[in-house]
């Protein structure tokens, strides 16, 4: 999700076109990228201090 996608998501919530609960579910999976054979955790360094 890039800045444009995030902005769209927030606008949809603001305009009532998406429930907050639905947006939270989408954001919950934001730091992970599923490559099919592995899930990359892009925020691990932020949480654990180690890559």
Image (spheres, grey):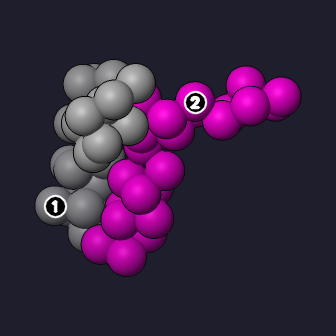
Q: Choose mark 2 or mark 1, whichever is in front.
A: 2
Q: Which mark is residue 14?
A: 1
Please tell me how crowded label 2 is: few (under 14), some (14-19), or many (20+) other residues with Cα within 10 Å: few
Residue on which disc 2 sits: 40
Tell me, yes or no, whether the highlighted magenta stretch contains residue 30.
yes
Position of residue 23 measured from the top left corner of the image (x, y, whole percent): 37, 62
Q: In the visual, does 37 lie left or right of 2?
A: right
Q: Residue at x 74, y 31 (%)?
A: 38
Q: Report helix, strand or loop for mark 1.
A: helix
Residue farthest to the right? Answer: 37
Pinpoint residue 18: horizontal percent, then vertical percent: 36, 65
Residue 12, above or below 19: above
**Which residue is found at the position 40% from the left and 24% from the top?**
51
Q: Of residues 5 and 47, which is closer to you in this image?
A: 47
Magenta span covers which residues?
A: 19-43
Q: Nearer the viewer, residue 48 or 32?
A: 48
Asked whether residue 2 is drawn in magenta, I would say no
Query: Is residue 34 shown left or right of residue 41?
Result: right
Q: Counting residues from the N terminus, which is met first, the one under dot 2 or under dot 1?
A: 1
Please tell me which residue is depicted at 30% across the width and 42% down the height of the picture.
48
């Amino acid at each position: 999700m890039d800045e444009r996608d995030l902005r769209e998501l927030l606008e949809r919530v603001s305009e009532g076109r998406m429930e907050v609960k639905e947006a939270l579910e989408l954001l919950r999976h934001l730091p992970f990228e599923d490559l099919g054979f592995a899930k990359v955790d892009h925020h691990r360094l932020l949480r654990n201090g180690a890559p």
